Image (cartoon, rainbow, N blue to C red):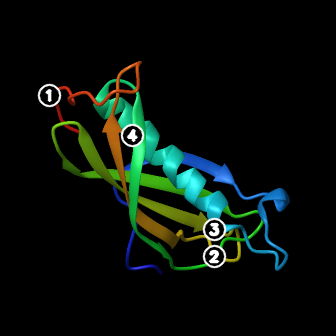
Amino acid sequence: MNEHQPRGRLSIRTIAMPADTNPHGHIFGGWLMSQMDLAGGIHAFGRAQGRVATVAVDGMTFHQPVFVGDEVTCTTEIVKTGGSSLSIRVEAWARRGCIAPEPLLVTSAIFTYVAIDDGFVKRPLPPGEG
């Protein structure tokens, strides 16, 4: 059993498909990073009550490979907010069906987003939490 369990909000869930693999049959890291950015962006959009832009990704760590057929779940948790920015911990978890029914942490990073208006100009975050 995995001692580290998913935490935060479930923000996205998908299945890794053959089109997302490298020549060795593992899922591309870029595909996984894209899923994580989508998950973080969903959470950031809700907190910012509108459009956000990704401005940084820190500490991207690939803990385990992801394989075709894995159910990939991304959880998100706001770890810091500023005047117009927010940092979100995004963790990607894989469930390998009957091979490993417990979720495995496969990738983690901190994504930073900035709230922007319709003209793509930075704007303040509205008051609130999570």
Q: Counting other residues with Cα less than 10 Å from the Cα at mark 4, is it few (<14), some (14-19), or many (20 or more)?
A: many
Q: CA distance from mark 4 to mark 1?
A: 15 Å
The local secondary structure at tag 1 comes to loop
Q: Quadrant of the C terminus?
A: top left
Q: Counting other residues with Cα less than 10 Å from the Cα at mark 2, is it few (<14), some (14-19), or many (20 or more)?
A: few
Residue receiving disc 4: 43
Q: CA distance from mark 2 to mark 4?
A: 28 Å
Q: CA distance from mark 3 to mark 2?
A: 21 Å
Using the image, determine if residue 13 lies above or below residue 72: above
Q: In the rendered view, does 18 fall on the left or right side of 4?
A: right
Q: Residue at x 33, y 52 (%)?
A: 88
Q: In the rendered view, does 81 fall on the left or right side of 39?
A: left
Counting from the top left corner in percent of width and height, residue 7 is at: 35, 59
Counting from the top left corner in percent of width and height, residue 109 is at: 41, 65
Residue type marked 3: Gly
Residue type marked 1: Pro
Q: In the image shown, does 75 or 98 lie closer to the viewer?
A: 75
Q: In the rendered view, does 49 fall on the left or right side of 90?
A: left
Q: Earlier in the sequence, mark 4 or mark 1?
A: 4
The local secondary structure at tag 2 comes to loop
Q: In the rendered view, does 49 fall on the left or right side of 13?
A: left
Q: Residue at x 61, y 66 (%)?
A: 95
Q: Residue at x 55, y 71 (%)?
A: 102
Residue receiving disc 1: 127
Residue type marked 2: Ala
Residue type marked 4: His
Residue receiving disc 3: 29
Q: CA distance from mark 1 to mark 3?
A: 35 Å
Asked if residue 116 shows in the view, the reply is: yes
Q: Nearer the viewer, mark 2 or mark 4?
A: 4
